[in-house]
Amino acid sequence: MPKVLLYITAKIIWNFLFYNTDFHENRAHVHVGKRGTEELCKIWLEPNIELAKQGDLTDKQVKEVIKIAEKYQSKLLHQWKQFKKGKTIKIIKIKE
């Protein structure tokens, strides 16, 4: 499960990651959760940012991670393309 982006705030660290099985999916997406999240949220990255699956996140948390995905959509899509090419992904760390 490669982590692709860590979004760090004073209250929480959001982990954006791909599952190894995502390699076989064509539509770009990312899974998001925090420590202790059992079922991650799934967000489509194209053609637009939209929720695919809420997972264990609250509505408020989903809104927060959607905003983060919108803000860093181009970086996440770049990571997706690298992942699909089988290239090494470097974790992007963002502190807010």
Image: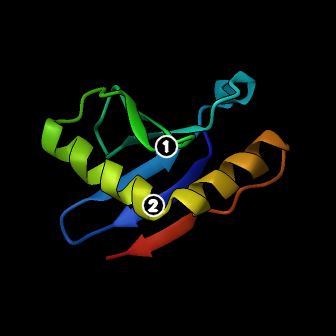
Judging depth in this view, the residue of 88 and 74 nearest the camera is 74
Q: Amino acid at mark 1?
A: Asn
Left or right position of 81 against 42? right
| Residue at image mark 1 | 48
Residue 41, visible in the rendered structure: no
Identify which residue is drawn at 71% across, 56% down. 89
| Residue at image mark 2 | 6
Disc nearest the viewer among 1 and 2: 1
The Cα atoms of the two marked residues, 1 and 2, are separated by 21 Å
Label 2 crowd bin: few (<14), some (14–19), many (20+), radius 10 Å:
some
Residue 81 screen position, x and y as percent:
75, 48
Left or right position of 50 against 57? right
Left or right position of 85 against 37? right
- Where is the N terminus found, in terms of image quarters? top right
Q: Amino acid at mark 2?
A: Leu
Query: For the residue labelled by badge 1, is the local secondary structure a helix, a strand or a loop?
Result: loop
Query: Where on the picture, by quarter, is residue 54?
Result: top left
